[in-house]
Image: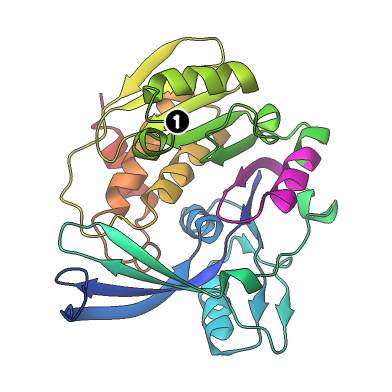
């Protein structure tokens, strides 16, 4: 029953601003705190909070205060397996400052990304795993190897943010989540749904297109199209909304729900998260996700 979340793990510094700073004009901070961050860790924390057996690996931690904070917060989740997160003396734990403005939008300052270390996927890491959740927040080679090992073991792979039909990960994916906004920025000549269809065909995978609170479109590997309308919310912080969408989606898929029903769980989880400051500072209970999910037509 275990879900393996492999990829980015760091310590986020949430900073609430009245606006983004500009040259010679400062911004005002009204709130700040630290919480678990990184795409893989965000998804894993929410899944574990719902009682799902979850394994987290990827980025390593340092033998420093930020690393201690991350380890302590991870240890609070009893169903979260962190055995494969390495710790190094003299290494700086990855950190990210999340600058959040009143509209809930965010900008990031990533600390020393060129120094990030990762633990390579291993056979033991896949013991008992039924789903692999990958992120693309970093170099491809380790993630490619993780996907290859999953396919060798007939473990379905879910990943986000692959936008190139020739990407080496695409043939290994079962479910791909992309952002309509990112798709437009990277492929201005293509409609996001046309790109989704191209990616589906190239990878023989389901493709889900999210759109920042607007309709979520699904292009199945059989070529069928459907959509889910997420609930309307007033966002406080959209940092990690895509990661928590994936948590809900994974929960639904592990429950053998049809893809469009699993997408409803993703929409509910992501929408709930946007109503809290910090991606993992507040972890919504499963009953709240279920209540919001049941309101989605």
Residue under the point 59% across and 60% down: 79
Question: Which secondary structure lies at badge 1?
Answer: helix
Q: Quadrant of the N terminus?
A: top right
Q: Which residues are magenta?
A: 129-149
Asked if residue 121 lies left or right of residue 184, the reply is right
Q: Residue at x 36, y 33 (%)?
A: 184
Say which residue label 1 marks: 262
How far across and how far down the image is residue 26, in percent? Answer: 18, 81
Quadrant in the rendering for residue 173:
top right
Q: Nearer the viewer, residue 236 or 190?
A: 190
Q: What is the x, y in percent for residue 50?
A: 46, 53
Instruction: Tell me residue 208's x, y (percent).
Output: 45, 28
| Quadrant (top left/top right/bottom left/bottom right) for the C terminus | top left
Along the line of sight, which residue is nearer the eye, 284 or 249?
Answer: 249
Query: Badge 1 local density, few (<14 within 10 Å), some, or many (20+)?
Result: many
Report if residue 204 is visible in the image. no
Figure quadrant of residue 222: top right
Residue at 26 percent across and 28 percent down: it is 229
Residue 260, compared with residue 61, is above or below; it is above
* 266 displayed left or right of 40: left
Is residue 143 on the magenta stretch?
A: yes
Q: Quadrant of residue 114?
A: bottom right
* Residue 21 at x, y percent in the picture: 21, 73
Q: Is residue 79 above or below residue 160?
A: below
Is residue 256 shown to the viewer in this render? yes
């Amino acid at each position: 029953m275990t879900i393996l979340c492999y990829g980015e793990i760091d310590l986020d510094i949430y900073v609430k601003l009245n606006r983004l700073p500009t040259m010679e004009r400062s911004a005002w901070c009204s709130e700040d705190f630290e919480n678990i961050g990184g795409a893989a860790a965000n998804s894993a924390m929410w899944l574990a909070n719902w009682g799902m057996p979850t394994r987290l690996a990827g980025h390593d931690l340092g033998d420093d205060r930020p690393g201690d904070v991350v380890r302590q917060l991870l240890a609070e989740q009893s169903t979260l397996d962190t055995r494969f997160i390495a710790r190094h003396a003299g290494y700086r734990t990855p950190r990210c400052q999340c600058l959040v403005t009143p509209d809930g939008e965010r900008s990031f300052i990533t600390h020393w990304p060129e120094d990030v270390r990762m633990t390579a996927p291993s056979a033991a890491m896949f013991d008992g795993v039924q789903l692999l959740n990958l992120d693309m927040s970093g170099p491809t080679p380790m993630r490619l190897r993780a996907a290859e090992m999953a396919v060798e073991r007939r473990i379905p792979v879910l990943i986000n943010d692959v936008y190139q039909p020739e990407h080496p990960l695409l043939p290994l994916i079962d479910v791909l989540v992309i952002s309509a906004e990112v798709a437009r920025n990277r492929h201005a000549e293509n409609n996001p749904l046309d790109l989704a269809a191209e990616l589906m065909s190239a990878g023989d995978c389901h493709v889900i297109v999210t759109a920042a609170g607007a309709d979520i479109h699904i292009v199945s590997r059989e070529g069928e199209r459907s959509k889910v309308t997420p609930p309307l919310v007033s966002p406080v912080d959209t940092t990690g909304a895509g990661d928590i969408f994936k948590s809900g989606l994974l929960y639904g898929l592990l429950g053998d729900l049809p893809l469009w029903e699993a997408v409803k769980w993703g929409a509910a989880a992501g929408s709930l998260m946007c109503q809290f400051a910090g991606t993992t500072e507040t972890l919504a209970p499963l009953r709240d996700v279920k209540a919001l999910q049941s309101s989605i037509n």
